[in-house]
Image (cartoon, rainbow, N blue to C red):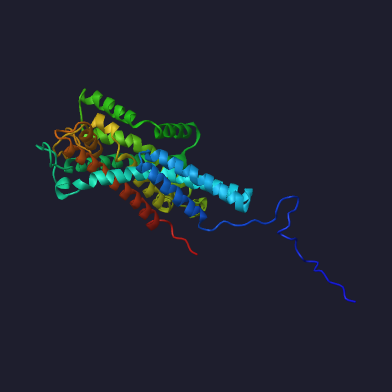
C-alpha cells in the first residue's frame, strides 16, 4: 500500500492568512499613478477654466492625486504599499508645485516679451523716442560694461582670498575672514548699493551717478560667491598632489600656480560664471548707483548709464501714453535678461565638462 509523499521544501500557502494578515496582495496596473495624475490634472484644468485660480487648482490636483492613489493602492496592495505610494505621490506633487511658479514666470515673460524681439529693439536706444519704437541697445551695452568691470574687480580679489584661506590661512585672521565672507553672502543687495553711494559721495559729493559705482556695488555681491566657490574647489584638490610637488622641492607659490589652480580650474571657472549670472540681473543697487538714461553712454567713469534691469523697471512703473509700447519694452528686456542668465548657466556647465580633470577608466 503506497502512502502519499510530501515535499519538505514546500513553502507556505500565500493565499492562506497567517494571524489574520494575508501573505500576498494584488497589484494595481503599472499605469495607475500616471492615469490618476492625468485625471486629477484634467479636473484641475476644468476648475481653472471655470474661474478657480491656478494655484488653488494645482493644490487640489496634488491632494486629490495623493488621496486617490493611496486609497486605490491600500485597498488592492495593502496598507504598507499604499503608504509607500502615498509618500511617492507627495514627493512628486511637491516637486510639481515648486516647478509651477517657474513655469508660470517663463511662459508669461516669453508670451509678453517676444513681440518686441526685432532688429530695432537691439540696435536702437530710447533717445528721442516717445511712444512706440526704440530699443535697449544703450541698456544692453551698459549691462555688459558694468558687469564686466564687476567681474574684473571681484575675480582676482575672490580667488586670492580663497587661496589664502585654503593654503596659508591659520589662526584668528583666517577665522575672521571666513566669518565676514559668510556675512557678506547674505547681505541684501540694496546694502551694497548704499555702500557704493556712500563711498563715492565722500570723494565726489552727493548726487554723483557713474557706471563704476554700479560695478563696485555688484562686486560686493560677487566677491563672497567667488570666494566660497573657489575655496570649495581648492579643498577638493587631493593633498597627494601637493605632497608630490613638495617632494620635488617645488616652492609653495609655484605648486599653487602649476598644480592646485589648474586642477581646480573647471570648478573655479564655473563658480565665477555663476557669480556673474547672480548679479547681472540686480536692480536695487543699480537704481541707487547708476540711475537711468535714454542715450548710449559707454564710459563707466562719466555720467549715468542704462542697464537692462533698471530699464525694465522704469518702463513698467512709468509707462507713457499709451502705456502698451513701454510695457512691451519692459517685458522684452526681462526676457533678454532671462536668456542671458540661462546662457551663462549653460556656459558654466560646458566649462565644467571641458576643463574637468581627465581620469582613466
Closer-to-camera residue (351/237): 351
Residue 62: image location, x then y, percent: 47, 44
Q: In this view, does 288 lie to the left or right of 74?
A: left
Q: How many numbered discs, if any?
A: 0
Closer-to-camera residue (353/30): 30
Q: Farthest residue in the right direction? A: 1
Residue 4 vertical position relative to residue 149 in the rendered view, above or below:
below
Examine the rendering and report whether any part of residue 263 can be seen: yes
Q: Is residue 82 left or right of residue 270?
A: right
In percent of the image, x 43 and y 43: which residue is there? 97
In percent of the image, x 20 and y 47: which residue is there? 115
Closer-to-camera residue (69/302): 69
Q: Farthest residue in the bottom direction? A: 1
In percent of the image, x 28 and y 25: which residue is there? 198
Examine the rendering and report whether any part of residue 160 can be seen: no
Q: Is residue 221 left or right of residue 81?
A: left
Residue 218: image location, x then y, percent: 30, 36
Residue 358: image location, x then y, percent: 44, 60
Residue 284 vertical position relative to residue 27 in the rendered view, above or below:
above
Q: Is residue 230 left or right of residue 196?
A: right
Q: Farthest residue in the front direction? A: 50
Q: Farthest residue in the left direction? A: 128
In the rendered image, the quadrant that contains the N terminus is: bottom right
Residue 22: image location, x then y, percent: 70, 54
Amino acid at each position: 500500500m503506497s502512502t502519499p509523499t510530501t515535499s519538505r521544501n514546500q513553502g507556505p500557502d500565500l493565499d492562506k492568512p497567517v494571524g489574520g494578515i494575508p501573505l500576498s496582495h494584488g497589484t494595481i496596473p503599472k499605469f495607475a499613478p500616471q492615469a490618476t495624475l492625468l485625471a486629477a490634472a484634467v479636473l484641475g484644468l476644468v476648475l481653472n477654466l471655470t474661474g478657480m485660480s491656478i494655484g488653488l487648482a494645482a493644490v487640489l490636483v496634488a491632494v486629490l492625486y495623493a488621496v486617490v492613489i493611496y486609497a486605490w493602492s491600500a485597498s488592492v496592495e495593502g496598507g504598507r504599499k499604499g503608504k509607500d505610494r502615498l509618500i511617492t505621490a507627495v514627493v512628486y506633487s511637491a516637486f510639481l508645485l515648486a516647478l509651477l511658479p517657474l513655469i508660470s514666470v517663463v511662459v508669461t515673460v516669453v508670451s509678453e516679451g517676444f513681440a518686441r524681439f526685432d532688429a530695432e529693439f537691439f540696435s536702437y536706444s530710447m533717445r528721442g523716442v516717445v511712444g512706440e519704437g526704440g530699443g535697449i541697445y544703450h541698456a544692453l551695452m551698459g549691462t555688459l560694461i558694468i558687469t564686466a568691470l564687476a567681474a574684473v574687480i571681484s575675480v582676482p580679489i575672490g580667488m586670492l582670498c580663497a587661496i589664502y584661506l585654503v593654503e596659508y590661512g591659520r589662526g584668528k585672521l583666517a577665522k575672521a575672514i571666513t566669518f565676514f565672507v559668510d556675512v557678506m553672502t547674505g547681505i541684501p543687495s540694496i546694502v551694497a548699493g548704499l555702500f557704493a553711494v556712500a563711498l563715492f559721495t565722500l570723494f565726489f559729493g552727493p548726487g554723483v551717478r557713474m557706471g563704476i559705482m554700479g560695478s563696485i556695488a555688484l562686486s560686493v555681491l560677487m566677491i563672497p560667491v567667488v570666494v566660497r566657490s573657489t575655496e570649495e574647489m581648492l579643498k577638493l584638490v587631493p593633498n597627494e598632489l601637493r605632497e608630490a610637488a613638495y617632494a620635488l622641492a617645488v616652492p609653495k607659490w609655484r605648486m599653487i600656480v602649476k598644480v592646485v589652480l589648474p586642477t581646480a580650474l573647471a570648478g573655479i571657472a564655473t563658480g565665477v560664471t555663476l557669480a556673474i549670472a547672480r548679479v547681472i540681473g540686480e536692480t536695487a543697487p543699480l537704481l541707487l548707483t547708476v540711475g537711468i538714461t535714454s542715450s548710449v553712454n559707454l564710459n563707466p567713469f562719466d555720467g549715468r548709464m542704462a542697464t537692462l534691469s533698471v530699464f525694465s523697471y522704469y518702463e513698467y512703473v512709468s509707462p507713457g501714453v499709451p502705456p502698451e509700447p513701454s510695457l512691451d519694452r519692459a517685458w522684452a528686456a526681462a526676457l533678454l535678461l532671462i536668456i542671458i542668465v540661462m546662457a551663462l548657466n549653460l556656459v558654466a556647465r560646458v566649462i565644467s565638462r571641458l576643463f574637468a580633470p581627465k581620469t582613466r577608466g
